[in-house]
Amino acid sequence: MTLPLIALLAACSDDAKTDALSARLDKLEAADPVDASALQASIDALDARTTTLEESTSKLDTNASAIGQRVTALERASGNDFWSVSGSCACGVSTATTWLDVSGATMYVSTTKGGPITVWANLSATNVYANARVHVESTDGAWSDDSVGSEGGYGGSVSVVGLFEPPAGDYAVTLQYSNTNGGSGMLEDYAIVAIQLTEGV
């Protein structure tokens, strides 16, 4: 085969490769471009799912905390137990003809069988007559009871003892005050000295 013929065949081969590459390029260019709106919609959907997962995680954390508190309460309620809380209210008091909660003087008790709950508490005040009582109410509002109120002297302290017989359930124990004798002053120190729970049988 002569050299000119070989060169001609090689040139034809290169032209064939070029034509094939051009055809592939034409196909790529003719293909549908990426749909930007569809891509954005997919991104938005992923963002929404991420937000939902974060909210679910937050709810799970909240539920876990509540369950932990409930377990602790049930563990404490497995037999005789005591709780206490104390503090200083420094709350202004004017004439209060109804019983009002002492701010901060609330505790929670759970009982699986029901049974006697005994509460000892005290309260002090300045420049006012402060009466005290203990209010116990189930967290679902289905049961409540109050101790007999104790009347305090002017600018003095008052102690109160309450005995309650609730059914099984979860309860808020709150120290309350009233100022039916008039005057205006301050609540000072308060304490729920002890709560004794004896499970029923």
Image (spheres, grey):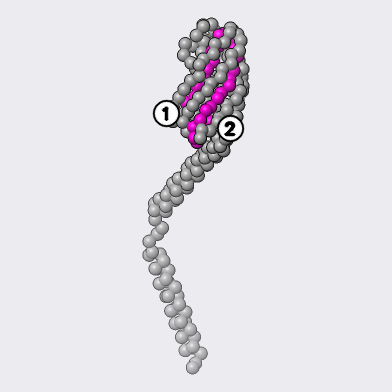
| Above or below, comparing residue 180 to residue 67 in the picture | above
Camera-nearest residue between 104 and 41: 104
| Mark 1, secondary structure of its residue | loop
Q: Are marks 2 and 1 in contact (CB under 8 Å)?
A: no
User: Relative to the observer, which residue lies in front, 21 or 99?
Assistant: 99
Looking at the image, which residue is at 52% across and 40% down? Answer: 67
Q: For the magenta stretch, what is the residue range?
A: 109-137
All told, the count of numbered labels is: 2
Q: Is residue 127 magenta?
A: yes
Rendered residue at 56%/19% (across/down): 161
Residue holding disc 2: 80
The answer to which of marks 2 and 1 sits earlier in the sequence is 2
Report the residue at 54% width, 39% height from top. Answer: 71
Residue 152 pos. (x, y %): 57, 10
Q: Secondary structure at mark 2?
A: loop
- What residue is rendered at 39% in x and 68% in y? 27
- Residue 142 tag number: 1
Looking at the picture, how far across and down is residue 201, in whole percent?
51, 35
